[in-house]
Image (cartoon, grey):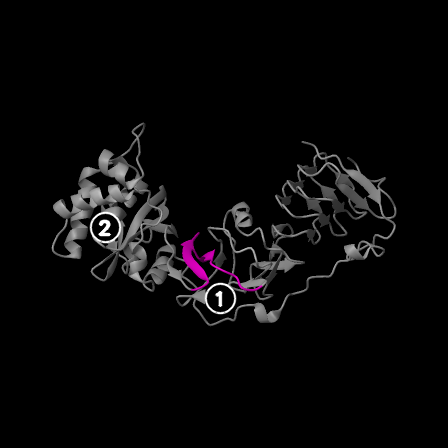
Amino acid sequence: MLAFVTLSVFQSCSSDLEVPFENDPSMTVTPSGAGNEDYFPMDDGASALSNDPAEALRQLVVNIKPERALSKGDLIITDEQFAEIKAFVDENLRRDNETDTYKAIFGWLVSNLQYAHGSTVAYLDPYDVFKRRTCVCQGYANLLKTMLLTQNIPAFGANGWLGNIGAHAWNYTYVDDEWIVSDATNNQWFFMKDVSKYRNQLIPFSTEISLFEDDRFTYDFQERQLNVSEVKYADEAHLTIPFSVGGYKITSFCPAKPVPENFKQLYLGKNILTFGASLNFFSECTNSIEEVFIDSANPELSTYKGVVYGRYQQAPYYIPAGMKRVELRLLEKVEKNTIYNLPYVEEIVFAEGTKYLEAYAIENCPRLKRVYVPETVTVIEENAIYRCPSDVEIVRGITGIHNVQM
């Protein structure tokens, strides 16, 4: 659907667009500044995780409470199905100690499950795998975890890569006070401390459970980063993401569920380097945020008027979903989906020096009212403003719009 726009000329539009309407106090912009320095997290001297993913996850796992891995987590299984598997393990695989029980369960999976090649149905849920006996790596990992949990042996799943072959799933298990890296699919297991023996084979990308938890946050390992995965509550109008947990720097803020809606400002220290691979998902989980402030010492991210940028990138990295007015720094060519899916934005301001608005530069902003473009803009492609209200105004300066091509 094409967004038909109304072109208007306002005589009081300033050249730098800092205060577009001198005659309309409601439109006056107050620069957001750098925020309150007291709200940034303190550098507590925590160590950075290793750049080797296997070693990084080991560094974290040795510091968690093993009982965190007694949760079923994301396993899809009923209580009745779990009880049936437990009865089978109790009768056939349980031994006098954890180590022998672990070996018996691991050996049973290796001997009785078949990898699903070609058109063979690959089951994933643990009960289906238990009954059907054909699966891929995720099925092996799910059933191994389930069988171990029936014996109160902690276990959790990891996802990542099998060498340079492809995506893979396996387990970390806690047996007789020792963490073991368990790959039932390929009939191999290693003591976690012996990283050199598996670091090039089992390369973790994420864990399926949270590793740490406190009163306000939970933390996991995502995209090879120590990540804040949940914000439990925010009792003020601002939220500060911590600097560290478990003795290591937190480097990612990618919540897996929506954050509390009462805070509007997000403060990030020099430690946070990423919001995760899916910024659309991040926006959905943080749609109350109106403004982001980032420590000026952050090596990867910076902010301008509440919008987040990569330190060495001109295009915005993240525009807070709760923003009502978006002001971008200079971006000569505004490309497709630069401004996308902002449910509350009413006004967008492009900086002096902007020249070109590509098709779909602004998309799916249902409350958008005005777009301010400087006189340097010479081309606005068809559908540059797409899936927005039909009466959006493009506001130009005193010289009019004679040099704009539509």
* Crowd band around label 1 with a 10 angstrom C-alpha radius: few (<14), some (14–19), many (20+): many
The CA distance from mark 1 to mark 2 is 34 Å
Quarter of image, res 296 = bottom right
Residue 75: image location, x then y, percent: 33, 45
Residue 161: numbered disc: none
Q: Earlier in the sequence, mark 1 or mark 2?
A: 2
* Crowd band around label 2 with a 10 angstrom C-alpha radius: few (<14), some (14–19), many (20+): many
Q: Please name the residue that numbered disc 1 is placed on.
A: 243
Please state if 116 lies on the left or on the right of 338 as rendered: left
- The N terminus sits in image quarter: top right
User: Which stretch is magenta?
Assistant: 215-236
Please state if 225 lies on the left or on the right of 240 as rendered: left
Q: Is 228 placed above or below 47 here?
A: above
- Going 21% across and 42% down the picture, which residue do you hit? 84
Magenta highlight on residue 84:
no
Q: Please name the residue that numbered disc 2 is placed on.
A: 148
Residue 220: image location, x then y, percent: 41, 56
